[in-house]
Amino acid sequence: MTTLKAQAVDGVKWTATSTLAVTAAKYIRTIILARLLVPDDFGLMAMLTVLIGLGQAFSDMGISLSIIWKQDASDDELSSIYWFNILTGIIVTGLVIAAAPLVVFFYHEPRLYDLVLWISPIFLVSSTGMPFQMMLQKELLFSRLAKIEIIATVVGAIVAVSAALMDGGVYALVWGSVVDIIVRAALLVVVGWKNWHPHVHFRWKDLRGFIRFGLFNMGERLLNFYYANIDYIILGRFLGGEILGIYMIAYQMVVEPFLKINPILVRVAFPVFAKKQEDNAVLRKGYYELSKVVALLTFPVLALIAATTHIFIPALFGEKWNQAIPLIQILVILGVLRALINPIGSILYAKGRTDMGFYWNLYGAVVNTVVFWIFVSYGVFVIAWLENGLTFISFILALWILNRVIGLKPAEYLATLARPLIANAIVAAATYAASLLLEEIVANGIALFAVLVVFGLSLYAAFLAIFERDLFKEYWRLLWRR
């Protein structure tokens, strides 16, 4: 287990390097684009994001991920999976093109027609690279994946900003996303080909061992995406592009930390847990440790966002985005809960229980749809509070599922999160108090934001030095071992 843990930490090191670079590029891109574009452009992109997510959920019928789950897949089985991916990519691309008029009708937005046609090829393109990504993850070759992600993100950001500078409007966001996916898929094929590549072989019988896993995984991914984006769908449908654009920025501010930090850990955790899938005691211990590290890394970012949003939104994004400030402060609770819920997938996939993930997300999708549909007329702030409450219920259900699957004990699990929760509540309160004191002294918003970040992180570092020294000494040793 020690060697496996060392491999896992090495994977975390490379994934963290990738994530830091990718996150920096995306934040810089978002800040620049927020100044060059208008909220309505971001609202249109949010509508497209829903369609992209639905297409990607169907793009491989959920089978690619089973490459990691089934440790002993034969070369014939892997080749059949690859060509099946290509087939489903072609089908989904055609369906997305055919769905363009329906998307326009649903949102009452004619501009979406051409935008849908622009994004339609990405499903076929991404299907060529997905099996190679799974193979690299299975073999824990995260250094290669890290380099691919950095290059693709930077190229996509350059295209998006260049298009915005040339008055491309919403097309800047679309073209940037399309180029990112094309570059990512091309590099996965080139790099992955050296480690494994398919041969000319396809048999339906090769897929039998993967179909059940894949169908439940596809359903779970589809429902999970719908569950996570039903607010976008309903707000866009009833409140329009401008309100949705503001909500999208606020939502991204609070979900971005766990969308960037959690995959560093969860992407590595799944193949590691899969190698120990029969030992529930090891899985429980690993999940407690994973959740604690997620909390220690994610919570301080959310605490600083909550405490400084009234400073950095006008300073970095501009006054036209000020309506997002109270939304961000409300949705920070959502960020905390989503960060804690997110790692459950690594356990369910490792145990082959994609069915439980499917039913859990089915419940969330149905309940959120009904509740949001009923209350959307009360405005975006009511939807934000409702999303917090419904996500808390999902968190409780997640603990029950983990208890059934690996015997997780809620009291032990919550005890591992006590220190990070208390520490970051103190960091948020102290940083917000400091912002009120310094606002009259430091006139420049960007300078004040920088000072507050340094203050908050220093306070948090003191907490780690006192209460979590042994944990971080162990991980530091593993990160920098020879």
Image: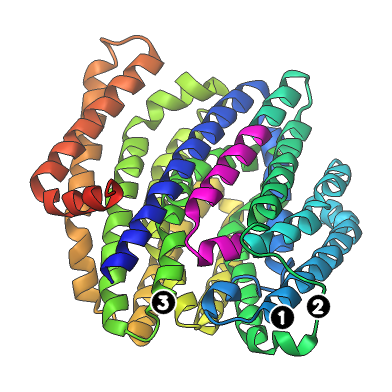
Q: Where 221 sits versus 246, above or below?
A: below
Residue located beneath label 1 in the image: 76
Q: Amino acid at mark 1?
A: Asp
Badge 1 or badge 3: first in the primary sequence: 1
Where's residue 408, x and y in %? 28, 79
Question: Between marks 1 and 3, how big is the CA–CA gap?
Answer: 22 Å
Residue located beneath label 3 in the image: 275
Q: Amino acid at mark 3?
A: Lys
Is 312 or 287 nearer to us in this picture? 287
Q: Residues within 10 Å of mark 2 (few under 14, many from 20)?
A: some
Q: Are marks 1 and 2 in contact (CB under 8 Å)?
A: yes
Query: Is 412 in the magenta?
Result: no
Secondary element under disc 2, as helix, strand or loop, is loop
Residue located beneath label 2 in the image: 201
The residue at 41%/55% (across/down) is: 11
Mark seen at residue 323 = none
In the drawing, does residue 294 fall left or right of residue 196?
left
| Magenta-tinted stretch | 133-156
The residue at 34%/9% (across/down) is: 443
Name the chief secondary structure element in magenta.
helix
Is 22 or 43 nearer to us in this picture? 22
Q: Amino acid at mark 2?
A: His
Secondary element under disc 1, as helix, strand or loop, is helix
